[in-house]
Amino acid sequence: MVDLDPEKLRDVPGWKGAPIHICMGADYRGLTFCCKPGYSLTHAFICKRDKILTEIGLTPEEFIQIKVEFSNENNWDSEVVCFGSLSYCCMRRNGCPRRDLALVERYPNKSLEEIMKIYFNKKKELSKRILECITSVDGKKKIEPFLDLF
């Protein structure tokens, strides 16, 4: 059992107890909301993605491949969003104009509530997949308690 800080969790449609962003101190599951490695970010000074990837033994290339495959499987490629895929989109509480536009395009005839439930449920699936791809012994030990949270 892992002890989670309730201040670092959110109840969002489709994912109760979702982690906040890694840069804000989330647990490993928060990698699902991280940007694509290799790009300059506005908030690069607080970004912990690369540090966390190293900590759990996942290369940036492996991280990208997981997100690309997930995006392809779920029709999440989009020219509208940053990095060309919804798999790199974040959690932003009040929404992201680009993300939300891309989601409306992907899921027409659904309410925004239904769309956000789909989005966060899929981000949860992606989070689990990222953690399940950890192969190093040390990395597995670190992420193992979080797999019980899915």
Image (cartoon, rainbow, N blue to C red):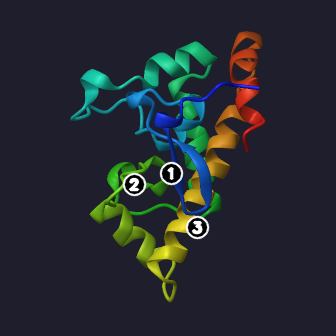
| Crowdedness near tag 2: few (<14), some (14–19) or many (≥20) residues, C-alpha within 10 Å | some
Hey, what amino acid is under mark 1?
A: Ser
Q: Is residue 145 left or right of residue 87?
A: right
Relative to residue 23, is residue 33 depicted above or below?
below
Whole-percent x, y for residue 9 in the image: 52, 41
Q: Nearer the viewer, residue 29 or 88?
A: 29
Whether residue 75 is visible, yes or no, is: no
Circle 1 or circle 3, nearest the eye: 3
| Crowdedness near tag 1: few (<14), some (14–19) or many (≥20) residues, C-alpha within 10 Å | many
Say which element carries label 1. Answer: helix
Calculate the distance from the C-alpha at mark 2 to the C-alpha at mark 1.
Answer: 9 Å
| Residue that label 2 marks | 84
Q: Which image quadrant for residue 59?
A: top right
| Residue that label 3 marks | 118
Say which element carries label 2. Answer: helix
Circle 2 or circle 1, nearest the eye: 1
Which mark, by number, is residue 87?
1
Relative to residue 64, is residue 86 depicted above or below?
below
Q: Is residue 98 left or right of residue 74?
A: left
Whole-percent x, y for residue 22 in the image: 45, 31
Hey, what amino acid is under mark 2?
A: Gly
Relative to residue 1, is residue 72 depicted above or below?
below
User: Label 2 near label 3: C-beta < 8 Å?
Assistant: no
Label total for image: 3
N-term mark: 3 or 2: 2
Calculate the distance from the C-alpha at mark 1 to the C-alpha at mark 3.
Answer: 13 Å
Q: Quadrant of the C terminus?
A: top right
Residue at left offset 39%, top offset 30%: 24
